[in-house]
Image (cartoon, rainbow, N blue to C red):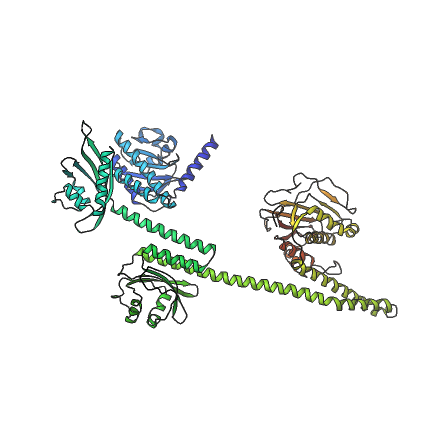
Amino acid sequence: MQTESYYQEQARLEALRRYQILDTEPEQAYDNLARLAAFICGTSIALVNFIDENRQWFKAKLGIDVPEMPRNVGLSYLCLERQDIVVINDTLEHEQYAANPAVTGYPHVRFYAGVPLISPNGQILGTLCAIDPQPRKLNQQQVEALLALGRQVISQLELRRHLAERQQTEAFLRESDQRLKLALQAAKLGSWQLDLKTRELAASSQCYINFGLPPEVEFTYSKLLECIHPDDRSYMQESVRQAIENHGDYEAEYRCIWPDNSIHWVLARGTVIYDSENQPIRMIGVTLDVTDRKQAEEELKRQNLRSQLFAEITLKIRESLQLTDILQTTVQEVQKLLHADRVLIFRLWADGSGTVVQEAVLPGWPVVLGQNILDPCFQQNYVEKYRQGRISAIFDIATAEIQDCHKAFLQQFGVKANLVVPILIRDGIWGLLIAHQCAHPRHWNNFETELLLQLANQIGIALSQAQLLEQETRHVQELARSNSELEQFAYVASHDLQEPLRMVTSYLQLLEKKYSSQLDATADQFINYAVDGARRMQNLINDLLNYSRVTTRGQPFVEVDCGEILEQAIANLKFAIEDSGAEITYDSLPIIKADPIQLTQVFQNLIGNAIKFRRDIPPRIHISALRADEGDGGQGGQGGQGRNVDKDVSSPLSTPSTLSPPSPHSALSTQHEWLFCVSDNGIGLEAQYAERIFVIFQRLHGRSKYPGTGIGLAICKKIIERHGGRIWVESESGQGSNFYFTIPDQAGQPS
């Protein structure tokens, strides 16, 4: 049961978080509900609270100063437990409540009435509660009213959620607002009664106010029709007719014209009263001024359009960084959104001139797209201001306080009002985003100014990103060219050194063979040095050629059995294994896509190093692999029999072995790749040299003790990187080494 309760609580908290209501700013709608709850219950305190893991957070509060309380303080927990309305007339009459900190201390609760706020899916999010420091009682009507207000809180939450998702915004807002206005019985609610036979209309004083009429005017049915906007009269009358005909309720939303010619919106609702013969005799109903809500809906539409425009432009920036598409979308959508006659993007040049690079213009007005424009007046007086971030909003070009030369310049394109914001990038000003009104002067509001400013910022970001992308592309291309040239140089240089070196080596060997007994000991020593140096140079050149050929001469990737590859590498090291008495074991290894020759070289180099850098005991070497996202060896990796190769390279060993996990500081492998490990009991190395050993020609020991060119691990690193993996070592001096490398798991996938 505790587990079930835990999951129920987690589901409740998740439902609460989906509304994104916690720690938001106060909102009038919730404040109104709290005030109405206090009014209905006659209390001095009312709260709309939401309960999370540790607290009760007050979205709306009346008569209390704190923004939140601990979850265990107060009585709202009772609504969670009972999942029903809770009314406590006097907390001091109940021992279990009297000791509550909210009763013994601030706010000294004596009366509590709480309604659980239940989401549509049945989760309790918090409470709507009325509280008072004096005992009280509620009648049934007050209880029902409080329950209705609780449902209104949920309706308001649902409204927020739908607005955030921008789905069914207008319909949900209208329905929620209507329910809220009726529930509150707001001051703007007026009542009326219409006699359907005589057309005599009786209206309350609030109806006069809703229609903008002074009290002394006779409010008749004819006067009502006169107040209604001509375009809405037929709709209103048809709504009345259908309500009567269908025996349904009447509802209409229409514009009315006040005596000062201002337009207001009225919501009218009513019902038809019938006589004993089922004949309609009168209608009764209410009117509500919904002008504020209509304006809010219009503002919301503009906000949604702006959000959609931002989303579209941002998507284009992320998908392609095609500036032409971004700029074209910007001017087209802004022109439609602002209902402007022309919207253009003006690219500024260093000399103060510029070019119109994008334009959206209504038919009938001059087209300026592609024009190169030089306005000396603009260049001298305005460019620097825009460079500093200035925004210009001109209501009427003819009366604006601008230079006459600039005024004349704008008028030649039919501009009567304009709105200009700069497009700034890191290096300064790039250009201007401009809206023109050509048919008449125009006031630009804050929404329009903010829209252009934010879009200009988005364009500036896109321009900067495009520049960075271009620089990065050039850098990558230059790096690829440089790498190609270096590889070619290494190959050519090494190849060209082969012939003269062979000649030097041959003559030195002839000299050693013919004259070694005829010269003194010093001369013999010099000849030996020269022969050894030539031989080491030959090995160095061969290794350098192998290094340069990793990427240029590599074979295509094919599916290979790593077990077979490893056996080939072991066979190549047969004599070294026999001489050292090495014992090699390995787990069942996977099938991967790789270059078989290069993968053999990796295993051969790592095993050869383990044999070379051994202690005074026989080398013990183990090879294993596991899939990063499975945690085991994949094919045969779970409980599979390990395999052993001693100096006979054939004897089995029935001791399974597992891969030693990398330590926390390692570059851990990611999903969908194989992690290989070659571990040994050799001399190891200090952690400070863990990266150095993979650098070409870097050696930690002298050639006299450990022969070699110092290029083997560099070749391994280059091979593994060609396969899309990484290689690293973890070791301690005298404690052996673990060489790790990764290769993506692409077996079974098309090439």
> Where does residue 182 sit, x and y in percent of width and height?
25, 38
- Image coordinates of residue 712 in percent, x first then y, are 69, 57
| Left or right placement of residue 708 versus residue 31 in this view | right
Residue visible at 78% across and 68% down in the picture: 503
Residue 106 visible in the displayed image: no
Pick the front one: 364 or 31: 364
Q: Is residue 272 visible?
A: yes
Which residue is nearer to you in this view: 301 or 67? 301
Extreme top residue here?
276
Residue 455 spot, x, y in % from top left? 38, 57
**Relative to 618, 329 lies left or right:** left
Residue sitting nearer the eye, 220 or 90: 220
Residue 165: where, in percent of width, then height? Answer: 39, 45
Location of residue 25 with respect to 421 vertically, above or below? above
Q: Is residue 555 left or right of residue 476?
A: right
Left or right placement of residue 336 versus residue 587 in this view: left
Residue at left offset 13%, top offset 44%: 215
Q: Please tell me which residue is depicted at 30% across the width and 36% down the height of the picture.
A: 149
Q: Which image quadrant for residue 103? A: top left
In the figure, residue 550 lies in which quadrant? bottom right
Count of picture labels: 0
> Which residue is situated farthest in the right direction here?
518
